[in-house]
Structure formats: C-alpha cells, structure tokens
Image: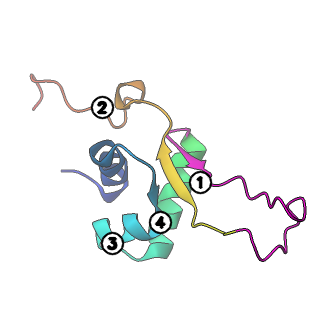
Amino acid sequence: MTTTLTRVLQLFEQHGRPLSLAEMARALDTDPDIVAEMLAYWVQRGRLREVSDSSGQCTRCSGRPSCPFVVRLPHRYELATTPADDPEVRPPCSCCG
C-alpha cells in the first residue's frame, strides 16, 4: 500500500518537472496545508528542493522587495535525488512482493 507521503514523490517522478503546492494538492485531492507539511518533510529529508522561477530582480529599481514590477510566483518544488537513494521509498524486491 502506498502512503500519501510516498505518492508526493511519485507525482514528481511522473511529471518530471517542478510542481507547485496547488498542483500537488489538486493531484492528491488533499488540503494544501497538509501537502505543505509533506513537502516540508521531503525538503528536510533532502528528497525535494524548492526552485525559483524568477530572479526577482527589477532592472528599474535594483530589485527592492516592494517593487511592483517583480512578479511573485508560487513556490515550486522538484526532486533533489533519485528514488534508489532512499530505502524508505524504494519499491519492494520481487521476492517480497
């Protein structure tokens, strides 16, 4: 039986691209707050990493945090390692089913 926590990693493997919290919550049909906790767990374990889609720099004002010209994109995550690196998520061998 696959746990929802393991399904998070499987979704990243299936999509092969960075995913947002909203995309993950929809795909798992789970509350975004719960998905955020699962993502934080995998980031802490080193299996996922947060990626930035933009530099957040404005060419007009040297990238001040309050600049209205810098688009704030949602946090996105991607796989940081391969499944074979973590025995917890490695599929069972053929002898144990």
Q: Single out the mark in the foreground, 2 or 3.
A: 3
Which residue is labeled 1 in the image? 53
Q: Single out the mark in the foreground, 1 or 2.
A: 1
Which residue is labeled 2 in the image? 90
Q: Give the Cα separation between the discs numbered 3 and 1.
A: 21 Å
- Left or right, residue 88 beside residue 48: left
Number of other residues with Cα within 10 Å of mark 4, as a class: few under 14, some 14 to 19, many 20 or more: some
Which residue is labeled 4 in the image? 21
Q: Give the Cα separation between the discs numbered 3 and 4.
A: 9 Å
Q: Is residue 47 magenta?
A: yes
Q: Give the range drawn in magenta.
A: 46-70
Number of other residues with Cα within 10 Å of mark 3, as a class: few under 14, some 14 to 19, many 20 or more: few
Quarter of the image for residue 95 reads top left
Q: What residue type is labelled 3?
A: Arg
Q: Give the Cα separation between the discs numbered 2 and 4.
A: 24 Å
Which residue is labeled 3 in the image? 26
